[in-house]
Image (spheres, grey):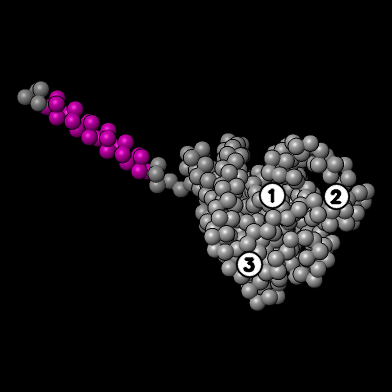
Amino acid sequence: MKKFRLFSTMLLSLAVFFFAAGGAGQARAAQKPEFELVGGINLDTAHPYYLGMVRFAELMEQKSGGKITMKIFPSAQLGNERDVTEALQLGSVDVTLISAAPLSSFTDDFQIFDFPYIFSNREHAYTVLDGEVGRTILKNLEEHGLIGLELMENGFYWISNNKGIEHPKDMAGIKIRALENQMQVDAYNATGANGIAMAFSEVFTSLQNATLDATGLTPSVIGSQKIYTVQKFLATTDHFYAAAPLLMSKSTYDRMSPELRKVVREAAAEARDYQRDRSKKFDEAKIKEMTDYGTKIIEVDKQEWIDAMVPPTYKKYVGRGKLIDAALYDKVKAMDPMK
């Protein structure tokens, strides 16, 4: 009898232990994260911007043990890039991944990345973005209420059109969309085109109704946004490289403990490498999709385009008292691994 009671007591103790442990686990699971972040991007869920943001969210949650989560709103649900960046400054949105050009309204630092043919290839871009130049530019965003975490990418721009553009002289009179950045407008104008600064949300309709004749965008965006359905040709100009700053609201970042800030930084660096890899592969997939659709890819002589775009843009924007410091320009060009 005593043995039976002892055995029963042991079973009861074990039951209480497992019940308590299970209850504690459920309680931990039910705890709210310390930070439930809101992230917004301009592009859709197929684009590498979104994939990079998802990876960033996953890594933050894993590395923080669930203390940081993030809900992502794609396709400009929270507004265009400028809107979301301003929301970060106000603290009403926590994270975004955008093109560098809209930041020109907050700081001139990013203008170097919008200079035509500033990078010869992706390796050159990564060398600059991940080195002293890129780190300094990201750090300088703090005085504008933004934390620059990393520089992801959208890739190199091609020109979509219905004319069959191959040479710079073919751009005469062409109405081409530029980002909301005057240097990009002027670079297009140097070829004889009419550069028009326009929000991305207006581009497809403007091409469809011929308010625009052409646009410069990456193959991944031209493909994912189905722009090739209203544009017959793509010229492989590679004239701009689109760096993509991953930004966090400074007010959000400042509320985090040093440990969680470290988590955010580590997650951002890992997500950057993942996103860049996705970007390259997505470009390749979209180029195939477009050629299968019937889009004609026109291979261009890039030196012709460099000669048309770079000298006039350099004369206007680079030098003492101008937008881009000549020493910085020379430093970036000298970092080309191919040189």
Left or right, 325 with reference to 85: right
Say whether disc 1 or disc 3 marks the residue closer to the N-terminus: 3
The CA span between labels 1 and 3 is 27 Å
Furthest-left residue in this view: 1
Q: Residue at x 63, y 68 (%)?
A: 231
**Callout 3: few (<14), some (14-19), or many (20+) C-alpha neighbours within 10 Å?**
some
Mark 3 = which residue? 232
Relative height, residue 330 to residue 205 (above, below): above
**Callout 1: few (<14), some (14-19), or many (20+) C-alpha neighbours within 10 Å?**
many
Quadrant in which the N terminus appears:
top left
Residue 74, given in percent of the width and then of the height, sits at 55, 59
Relative height, residue 291 to residue 324 (above, below): below
* Label 1–label 3 contact, CB within 8 A: no
The CA span between labels 3 and 2 is 36 Å
Say whether disc 3 or disc 2 marks the residue closer to the N-terminus: 3
**Looking at the image, can residue 261 be seen?**
no
* Label 3–label 2 contact, CB within 8 A: no
- As helix, strand or loop, the secondary structure at mark 1 comes to strand
- The amino acid sitting under disc 3 is Lys
Q: Residue at x 18, y 30 (%)?
A: 11
Residues drawn in magenta: 5-27
The CA span between labels 2 and 1 is 17 Å
Relative height, residue 206 to residue 70 (above, below): below
Mark 2 = which residue? 324
- The amino acid sitting under disc 1 is Ala
Q: Main secondary structure of the magenta part?
A: helix
Q: Quadrant of residue 269?
A: top right
